[in-house]
Image (cartoon, grey):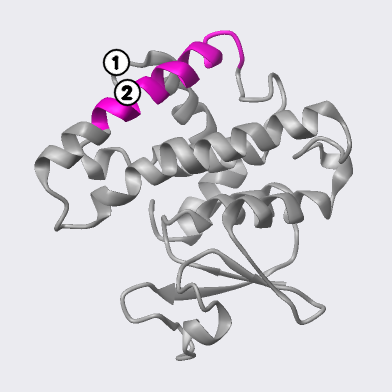
Amino acid sequence: MKLYYSPGACSMASHIVLNELSLKCDLEQVSLKEHKTKSGDDFYKINPKGYVPAMSLDNGQVLTEGAAILQYIADQKPESQMIPKFGTFERYRCQEWLTFISSEIHKNYSPFFNPQTPEQTKMNLKSTLSKRFQYVADHLKTNPFLMGNQFTVADAYLFTVLSWSQGMQIDLTPYPALMGYVERIKNRPAVMDTLKKEGLVK
């Protein structure tokens, strides 16, 4: 397997899960500005969508979209419970979280990466995000992780997108449960190792 990633991007969630499971996987950094891999390959030839993550599998296929890749990785070690077993209701609940993070949180962060986004649009997005944050924070007041007591792929994804907040001037301090959650996950050995490997912390 090979994971195509960009430091700190949404691909970091997949990197975290790989480390949590101690799975062997090659890593190839991608410049999202030039759409080139670190080795000089045209990334569009690997993933025509042009963004990370993408995962090259041992059977020659390339899998894209973070939520799909996260589930694929977790299913390589089902005994880890990094995602509930296929066919259980808990599996659908975890997919519910993955979808919510993707459509309601991740996508509302995306315009902040574009310097052309108007300030009024950013203000509107912050208002929308505040409602999403409150929903998640209320859940985390009585649950250490999104799926209860078990760290799962959904937590790797949520942590990744929340980690963008400081750089985007998005304030999480009104949500102590979210702040505690981010710090708790950051201190997991596999997460800290990922942050170091991506050059985000020393």
Q: Describe residue 49's horizontal placement relative to residue 34 as left or right.
A: right
Label count reads 2
Q: Residues within 10 Å of mark 2 (few under 14, many from 20)?
A: some
* 111 vs 158: above or below: below
Q: Identify the main secondary structure in magenta.
A: helix
Residue 83: image quadrant is top right
**Mark 2 or 1: the one toward you:** 2
Element carrying mark 2: helix
The quadrant of the picture occupied by the N terminus is bottom right
Q: Disc 1 designates what residue? A: 174
Q: Residue at x 82, y 40 (%)?
A: 80
Question: What is the distance, in whole Å, between disc 2 and disc 1 at their CAs?
Answer: 9 Å
Q: Describe residue 155's horizontal placement relative to residue 171 as left or right.
A: right
Start and end of the magenta stretch?
126-143
Q: Is residue 188 visible?
A: no
Q: Amino acid at mark 2?
A: Ser
* 37 vs 193: above or below: below
Residue 103 pos. (x, y %): 48, 41
In the rendered structure, find residue 130 and report the number of the disc placed on it: 2
Task: Find out whether the residues at labels 2 and 1 contact each other: C-beta distance under 8 Å.
Answer: yes
Residue 60 pos. (x, y %): 76, 82
Q: Residue at x 61, y 32 (%)?
A: 97
Q: Is residue 161 visible?
A: yes
Q: Residue at x 52, y 45 (%)?
A: 192
Q: Amino acid at mark 1?
A: Pro
